[in-house]
Image (spheres, rainbow, N blue to C red):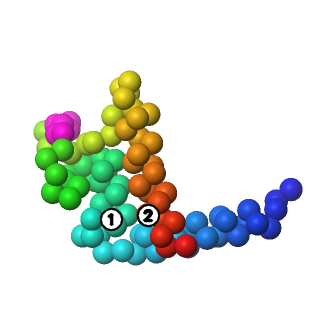
Amino acid sequence: MEKPEENIQVSLFIRALQLLYNEDYTKTLSYFQIAGIHGYPGSVRWDNSAGPTHLSKDNKEHFIYCTHNLLTFPTWHRPYMALFEVYTSCFC
């Protein structure tokens, strides 16, 4: 059984996420740029940083920061998600 307060929370999250999506993609804390920290789009450096580079199958340079499939994944991914959560909550 759904609780009305859960519906409100989901609705607020969707609204905040939409406002974050609407931010100018060139802003350091836009959805586009925050997603870029994770690695997609991989052709974008976050805040002009000199992040790690990887060559894709098409030999294009990509800047992928996330450490998937490595032991350090949880300690990398949690601060990334915290940034996403905190900044999204600014739009509530």
**Residue 18 visible, this angle:** no
Classify mark 1: helix, strand or loop.
loop
Residue 34 is left or right of residue 49, and the answer is: right
| Observer-nearest of 64 and 28 | 28
Residue farthest to the top, as pictured: 71
Residue 6 vs residue 32, the one in the foreground: 6
Labels 1 and 2 touching (C-beta < 8 A): yes
Where residue 71 appears, x then y in whole percent? 38, 24
Given residues 20 and 85, the one toward you in this image is 85
The residue under the point 45% across, 49% down is: 81
- Residue 29, which numbered label? 1
Q: Which residue shows up at 44% across the image and 34% down it?
A: 74
Q: Which amino acid does label 1 sit on?
A: Leu
Disc 1/disc 2 C-alpha distance (Å) = 8 Å
Tell me the magenta residue range: 52-57
Q: Which kind of residue does numbered mark 2 sit on?
A: Tyr
Identify the image quadrant of the C terminus.
Answer: bottom right
Give the x, y percent position of residue 24. Answer: 31, 75
Circle 2 residue: 87
Q: Look at the picture and state if 42 lies above or below 68.
A: below
Answer left or right for 5 relative to 86: right
Note whether 18 is above or below 78 in the view shown: below
Residue 74 drawn in magenta: no
Q: Can residue 72 be seen in this view?
A: yes
| The N terminus lies in quadrant | bottom right
